[in-house]
Amino acid sequence: MQRLSAIALLGALVGGCKSDEIVWAGFNADDQTLIVEVLPTGSPKGEPISIELLSNLERTVVGEASVDPGSGPVGTLHWVTVDVFDEFEGIVGRASVEVDTEAIEDLDGDGEVESRGEGEWDMRQDSADPGAFAIMLESLGRDDEQREDRFTIRLWQPEDLAPGVEPEE
């Protein structure tokens, strides 16, 4: 009898548990991209660059993003920041940056154009300001390399807060 009760309890616990994992839905427009110039070693660093972040239908400005410096030689550390306006910071719970490098010229003479690839990183949320996010990224490459990297900013909201999206039961 005790074994049967333990099995019934285990079945109830497994069957009755809901996942606490958050499912994220996009909040801002798709192509919110900053172009960062990566320059040969010895080149000067450029001024910061920024963009307004728009809602998914591109009707409302919901924040801004910047990269400082906006250009620099290989090895430059770029401070990527996002500021979500106060009226939207209770909805946006996550920010990420997708970095995609443009193809670069044939540097090693093998006849093939190279690309550094792409990746996406979650930004760190400020402990005192829930609308502030940041990450430091380093531009990597060869000393004589010159290219443009695309930093696409993505804002995320929990799917159950997204209008018009029915949460899974």
Image (cartoon, grey):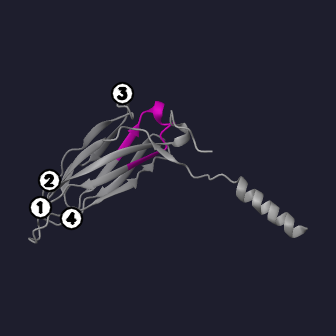
Q: Position of residue 66 (x, y in %)?
A: 30, 43
Given contact means CB atoms under 8 Å apart, are the residues at marks 4 and 3 in contact? no
Tell me which label, 3 or 2, sits earlier in the chain.
2
Answer left or right for 5 relative to 57: right
Tell me which label, 1 or 2, sits earlier in the chain.
2
Tell me which label, 1 or 4, sits earlier in the chain.
1
Q: Position of residue 70 (x, y in %)?
A: 22, 47
Judged by depth in the image, the label closer to the viewer, 4 or 2, is: 4
Q: Amino acid at mark 2?
A: Pro
The residue lying at 63 percent from left, 45 percent from top is 169
Residue 84 shown in magenta: yes
Looking at the image, which residue sits at the far top? 59
Query: Could you tell me how many numbered marks the image carries?
Result: 4
Which residues are drawn in magenta? 81-96
Q: CA distance from mark 1 to mark 3?
A: 38 Å
Mark number for residue 146?
Answer: none
Image height check: is 122 above or below 83? below
Tell me which label, 4 or 2, sits earlier in the chain.
2
Q: Which residue is mark 2?
A: 44
- Few, some or many C-alpha atoms within 10 Å of disc 4 (few <14, some 14-19, many ≥20)? some
Q: Which residue is mark 4?
A: 141
Q: Which residue is mark 3?
A: 59
Q: CA distance from mark 4 to mark 3?
A: 38 Å
Residue 24 shown in magenta: no
Q: Which residue is mark 1?
A: 105
Disc 1 is placed on an element classified as: loop
Q: Amino acid at mark 1?
A: Glu
The residue lying at 14 percent from left, 63 percent from top is 113
| Residue nearest the observer in this picture, 119 or 87 | 119
Tell me which label, 4 or 3, sits earlier in the chain.
3
Q: Amino acid at mark 3?
A: Arg
